[in-house]
Amino acid sequence: MTVDAAKLVRMAEQITANMAYTDDVELVAARVADHLNRFWDPRMRQAMAEAANGDADQLSPALQAAVRQLHGVGGGGVP
Amino acid sequence: MPDMNLYYRVGAERDLGTPAANGNPANGGADAAPTVNVEIDGRHIGVPEGTSVMRAAALAGASVPKLCATEDLDAFGSCRLCLVAIEGRKGYPASCTTLVEEGMVVHTQTPRLAELRRNVMELYISDHPLDCLTCAANGDCELQDMAGAVGLRTVRYGYDGAHHLDKPKDESALYFSFDPAKCIVCSRCVRACEEQQGTYALTISGRGFDSEVIASQNDAFIDSECVSCGACVKACPTATLIEKSVIEHGQPESAVITTCAYCGVGCSFRAETQGGQLVRMVPNRDGHANHGHACVKGRFAFGYATHRDRITTPLVRDSIDDEWRAVGWDEAIRTAAERLQGIQARHGRKSIGGVTSSRCTNEEVYVVQKFIRAAAGNNNVDTCARVCHSPTGYGLKTTLGESAGTQNFDSVLQSDVIVVIGANPTEAHPVFASAMKRRLRQGAGLIVVDPRAIDLVQSPHVRADHHLQLKPGTNVAVINALAHVVIEEGLEDEAYIRARCDMEAYRIWRAFISEARNSPEATEAATGVPAGQVRAAARLYAEAGNGAIYYGLGVTEHSQGSTMVMGIANLAMATGNLGRPGVGVNPLRGQNNVQGACDMGSFPHELTGYRHLSDQATRKLFEAEWRVALDPEPGYRIPNMFDAAIDGEFKGLYVQGEDFAQSDPDTQHIYAALSAMECVIVQDLFLNETAKFAHVFLPGCSFLEKDGTFTNAERRISPVRKVIAPLSGMDEWEITCRLATAMGYEMRYSHPSEIMDEIARLTPTFRGVSYAKLAELGSIQWPCRDEASAGTPLMHVDQFVRGKGYFAPTPYVPTDERANARYPLLLTTGRVLSQYNVGAQTRRTGAVAYHREDKLEIHPADAQLRGIVDGSWVGLKSRAGETVLRAQVTERVQPGVLYTTFHHPESGANVITTDNSDWATNCPEYKVTAVQAYPVSKPSEWQEMFRRFTAAQQQLSEQALGEAQPSFAPAKLQRDRQVAQA
């Protein structure tokens, strides 16, 4: 993971933490994915997803699930 | 184009002598009062109950002589010149303090009144210098006018007796002079300082003939509590208090109504000129945001506009180690366009971007985002509001449905309790602070949530009921605790919630907020605020009646900024404090056009009016108007641009009036990013810190050189009108249009009014906004939902913009930036009254005399522990960098907390701040940085580097500027109306 990708993952985890008012992982994941799709440049989503997938066991479960729902990122979501 | 004659027309300011009935006209009370019919000099008139005879007479067209009365201040009745005769009454009552009664018959001119008035004037003039011809107020002196009006011909008393004519002048104030010899002791200055400004710096000392106006304890003005707002100067009917600029230049001969370019209050001013020379800025009595009041910056600090540092010629260079070369506009535009296109050819369409400025007009901002989206073909556009109020946009949109404050400023005059969170209005929004203080003096409750004891906590006639002095970074814990108390103690407005909010979201939120972890007792350890105090504050806010929340960057500039904004909205919804006068959620915007820059589609993910790019209907609307396909995906935000620059994929940046290299956090990171780019284009007034890294410099215009509009913190669109012609010869919106055209996308307008017309066509909330309408109404608060709308002072009146109000759960996630053994203190930042933001403008005015350097506030306990004494140098180190500031030991800050301002670049306040940012918007966490402080004897390494770099860059610009700078003879006024008429 490069430094910048690490920062993107850190930012994504920060989003996840702030959305985690409930234990419902799927709900949090959906909200995180929606936020990233709405506000992040696709290049950032891509870079974050690549880094996250390479280091998936380090991620929170909600972010792991969210990554799978990102638009324009290898195989997931609707562009 | 509107009729420019109408657009620029300015009526003479009329003074009706006493305020409208029920005080401030904005209260709306005057309209509701029953009408009273009176006869004045044979003319019949109906006026609202509570109107003075003087005001009724003025409205009837009869002018009663007066000296101590002015519409801006409550009637006082001291000068005895405004006497009138009222049928059926004994004597001659003062018309200013006598209220109309039904059927009253008033005579304002009789032989007996004339005699009485002449006698009064004779006494005044017997103790007044007779130097009218050489007096600075000659031509604008009410005493002179009244002497003429009453027909004073002789003074029988002679001039030999006791008098005040030898009193020395006090020239100590920077912008005005005080000449007690000319004072008539009408008390207008004293009352202006009390009623309008609320500072109580002036008083009348002594009694009878010995009465005189003094500042503080008979101090020189500069040493007194005076904040130089200029209210006393405007109020003074003689030359006693007068602008030094009028003493220097003489009386202005014409005026233009325009809008201040400093803070988000957006005061309306009469810019008074003599030829092409701006003589003074006088607050506009008819200004809807400021009602004739001003602060030291807007009133006096305009000298930067003609400062010798102004760059008025385009400059180019190949590398930042090269000398700048002065070029013509054609070459500069061609160079900029070629370089941006070259970068796109080599690195792709998305390798460049632009940043709009919250200091520029709506029209200028709009064309920059259009340029990026349509000409550059990507969405890498952002605005400097990113680093201040982006969480406001996110938070209020999510909860209420619109990214803006809910009230007009005047609403505060109907508040029963005012909550100020992370804002320091007396320093940063002084004119609004004056309105707030007026309401506080009338008895409204006050809750201050701030790590520091700001002035509002205790100042003349104002004392906070509760100061929740929290630790920096714990806002969300405090707002959650307040909401917890509201729910736990049953203080919520159930009927309101049921009628207006999304009940499913409310149910989830209610369960969340009721959890024990959100109680004041549980959060006390983190926040440092005693639980009892939080409970008392929550009860006061929920039960007082009209509860209004005002907040600033102390809310947004945190890693949980967006959460906090939503927390504030939740609290207001839960207590039913939205949708009527006196309540609301109100962001105080730092810069003049933060609201406008956000409204204009500056954010990378949305078009004008906060509509997301992914919305196909909106996109189609713009694609049809702009004749270009738009990318539906968001682009980079400012911090993302910098990260991508360091990463090597972002290479070119067009910067409109923002100074990242000073204002953005983690300076060394910014320096690295700017250095990594191939082409940085800076459009600004000065070669600022960012321009040291630039390759093309395009000289911008000060607000005095612009036609356009600003939108203030209350969504008020106000006109900005040209007072002088652009010093650079080019309007700023035109620079952007020419750049777009040079890149192959034609953008042409003949006047900014056409840009506004385009905005209005494309933006539902701006429907019907036009320059003609602005000229007619003075200002308009959006939303304007149809052509006929005159604007919307209060939002969410019948329902929330989003339909049902949304309670967003707001978990408190502490920042990573925590005090630890290595960095045991928390640094927070703010501003002072006399300076503005990075100081680019105010440092180039007399304001430097008030604030020569940024100081580090430190609590005596922390100072003593470290051997730091007041005035000594302190080293400050965070994980981002190190700088040195001078210490100011004070109990305003709590132990463990440091505070500084960032008005001077060499202070390096942002060398210390980190890359931490708000989770939702990437708004930087300026307000919390873990640091260590220690005594030092020399500047930091960064500061040494900064000095060397600054000196080197100065050398690189000297030659070009020596050749190119024109002299600052007053620019010939070349208004568009003249062009249009030719």
Image (tube, rainbow, N blue to C red):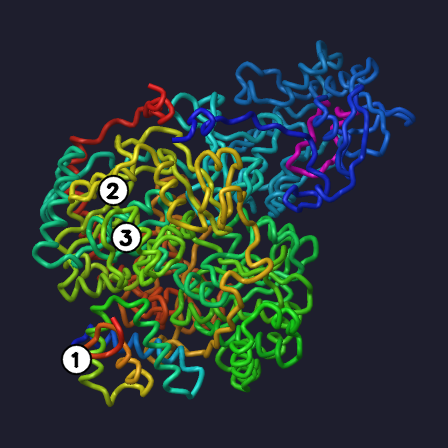
Tag on residue B926?
none
**Residue at label 2?**
B736
- Give the residue type at disc 3: Val
Question: Residue B154, how many percent across, how many down?
Answer: 72, 10
Asked if the stretch drawn in magenta spans residue B102, the answer is no
Drawn side of residue B828 relative to residue A58, left or right: right
- Up/down of A13 relative to B839, above or below: below
| SS label for mark 3 | strand
Range covered by the magenta-colored residues: B63-83
- Give the residue type at disc 2: Thr
Q: Are marks 1 and 2 on the same chain?
A: no
Question: Residue A35, how many percent across, how many down?
Answer: 34, 72
Q: Nearer the viewer, mark 1 or mark 2?
A: 2
Question: Residue B546, how many percent across, how many down?
Answer: 66, 61
Q: Which residue is pictured at 25% across the width and 66% down the height?
A: A41
**Residue at label 1?**
A1
Q: Which of B694 and B900 is in front in this view?
A: B694
Q: Which residue is pictured at 56% across the width and 40% down the height?
A: B293
Q: Is residue B243 visible to us here?
A: yes
Q: Is residue B692 visible to us here?
A: no
Going by the picture, which residue comes out furthest to the top? B153
Drawn side of residue B687 relative to residue B408, left or right: left
- Up/down of B483 relative to B375, above or below: below
| SS label for mark 1 | loop
Q: Do labels 2 and 3 share a chain?
A: yes
**Residue at label 3?**
B355
Question: How dense is the environment of label 1, judged by Cα within 10 Å: few (below 14), some, or many (20 and up)?
Answer: some
The secondary structure that dominates the magenta segment is: loop
Question: How dense is the environment of label 2, judged by Cα within 10 Å: few (below 14), some, or many (20 and up)?
Answer: many
